[in-house]
Amino acid sequence: MSLTELLAGFALPHALVGTVALITFWTAGLARKGSPLHKGVGKLYMIAMIAIVLTAIPLTLSMALRGHWVSATFLAYLVILVSHSCRLAWLAIRYKHDFARYSGRGLRVSASLLTLAGIIVVVIGVQFQAWLLIIFGLIGPLGGWGAWNLVRKGPQSPKWWLKEHYGAMIGNGIATHIAFMQIGLIRLVPELGSSVIQHLAWFGPLVLGLAAGFLLDRRYFRPQVLPAGRI
């Protein structure tokens, strides 16, 4: 068995942990926030996401060895993006009472790496006129800018950790659903492999995730209306 075939063999465990991630995402998402079920299943989801990242690394190397450099670069970028989101989701809860530790050197390094990776993907997307790479690549610089902006301004609300947590979890959820529809669902039902369906599989979760983030921001961070005479 060649090295390329050995690395490609990680596709099955990658798909299996992806299925676990999808199930635990919705189980934790539908559970009452802060409940033992939410916390316990949420930890399982994070473990599954870490396994997804670890199994994606050899798949990325396999693509590179087969000469698919654009796909390998994009997958490597997604690994960085998901790793960044997992880190934020985990540490936002762990350090919700210690903003200094949350926003320390680790966040700055992670944000810088994400920004650089996103810019590289955008450049490749422009070169090949691939809107998919351009749009998803822009998430990197935007995410990095958001992290650096948080470091510069500091927490703007006592619930800063909540926004960081659910924002990162929404990002992870987008990645989980894209992977399921692109890798799992389309392989199970090849008839869904048309160009339109594939674009829906990529951009559908992204649009829904952005909408969910907007609604959660409205719910938890609605601007306060000051009484008349106090403006």
Image (spheres, rainbow, N blue to C red):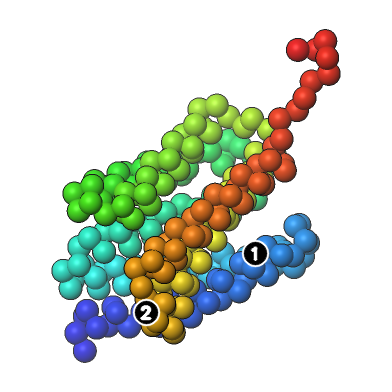
Quarter of the image for residue 21 reads: bottom right
In this rendering, position of residue 167 left or right of residue 135: right
Residue occupying image coordinates x 26% and y 59%: 73
Q: In the image, what residue type sits under mark 1?
A: Gly
Q: Nearer the viewer, residue 59 or 3?
A: 59
Where in the figure is residue 105, as x and y percent of width and height? 45, 39
Residue occupying image coordinates x 26% and y 54%: 130
Q: Quadrant of the N terminus?
A: bottom left
Residue occupying image coordinates x 83% and y 18%: 227
Where in the figure is residue 201, as x and y percent of width and height? 44, 66
Secondary structure of the residue carrying tag 2 is helix
Tag 1 residue: 42
Where in the figure is residue 19, as x and y percent of width and height? 53, 77
Q: CA distance from mark 1 to mark 2?
A: 24 Å
Where in the figure is residue 42, as x and y percent of width and height? 64, 64
In the rendered image, is residue 97 in sight? no
Query: Are the two marked residues, 1 and 2, in contact with CB atoms closer than 8 angstroms?
Result: no
In this rendering, position of residue 228 left or right of residue 118: right
Tag 2 residue: 11
Quarter of the image for residue 15 reads: bottom left
Q: Nearer the viewer, residue 200 or 166?
A: 200
Residue placed farthest to the bottom in the image?
Answer: 1
